[in-house]
Image (spheres, grey):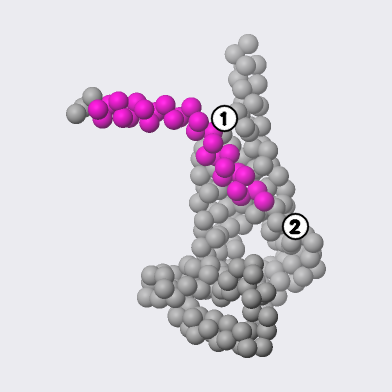
Amino acid sequence: MNQIITKGFASLDKTRAADFIAPLLLRLYLAPVLMQAGWNKMNHWQDTVAWFGNADWGLGLPMPALMAALAVGAEFFGAILLLLGLATRLVAIPLMITMLVAAVTVHLENGWLAIADASSWLADGTILSNPAIMEAPEKLAAAKSLLQEHGHYDWLTSSGNFVILNNGVEFAATYFIMLLTLFFIGGGKYVSVDYWLQRRFAEKISN
């Protein structure tokens, strides 16, 4: 039995030869998401600054222009660095801060779920729940009924079903965890600039 377990662990250890795949996929997943977020803020700069600074309908942050510039820089240019695997661990830090700020200032009041799914066990009765989610099925049914009666329902749903956005912390928390993972493990072997720079410096030191 011990031999079987030992051989099993030895077989699993062989997969470490491909352990660069995980950080690569994390980077490839995060880069376009973050780049798009940064581009949207940059492309609508005045609206972004106003949203950052307005306390009534926005975030109410101090120095909104500076805060918006930091967010754009972290997301857009940070995404480029992630894609290259350059300064991966360092760039993960401001991006994690951005995710935390977004989670606390924008999403937390809506609970956990990004999409209002009343059937989820996270919809009601938990710490990160939003009671308004329980009304989502009724509202969605009413919207579908109106569209079926007065609109081109088949055309409107040809790209996917309608949902009600809850805008909870789910996505921000997921991205934070992915970035935290990259902070600890780096960009990965072979497919990141960090790896080749580290090898180059290591060779110089050894010589």
Q: Pick the quarter of the image with the C terminus.
A: top right
Q: Which residue is mark 2?
A: 39
Q: Nearer the viewer, residue 143 or 18?
A: 143
Q: Nearer the viewer, residue 57 or 156?
A: 156
| Horizontal arrangement in the rendering, residue 126 relative to residue 45 (left or right) | left
* Residue extending furthest toward the front: 154
Residue 14: x %, y % from top left = 42, 26
Residue 119: x %, y % from top left = 41, 73
Which badge, 2 or 1, is on the more N-terminal residue? 2
| Horizontal arrangement in the rendering, residue 101 relative to residue 16 (left or right) | right
Residue 55 visible to an observer of this rendering: no
Q: Quadrant of residue 167?
A: bottom right
Q: Nearer the viewer, residue 56 or 165?
A: 165
Q: Quadrant of residue 23?
A: top right
Q: Which residue is mark 1?
A: 189
- Numbered badge on residue 25: none
| Horizontal arrangement in the rendering, residue 83 relative to residue 114 (left or right) | right
The prevailing secondary structure element of the residues shown in magenta is helix
Q: Residue at x 67, y 51 (%)?
A: 32
Residue 183: x %, y % from top left = 54, 42
Residue 84: x %, y % from top left = 68, 38
Q: Secondary structure at mark 1?
A: loop
In the image, is residue 54 above or below residue 180? below
The question of residue 127 being in magenta is answered with no
Q: Residue at x 53, y 67 (%)?
A: 114
Q: Pick the quarter of the image with the N terminus.
A: top left
In the image, is residue 160 above or below residue 34? below
Mark 2 in CB contact with mark 1 (< 8 angstroms): no
Residue interval drawn in magenta:
4-32
In the image, is residue 135 above or below residue 61? below
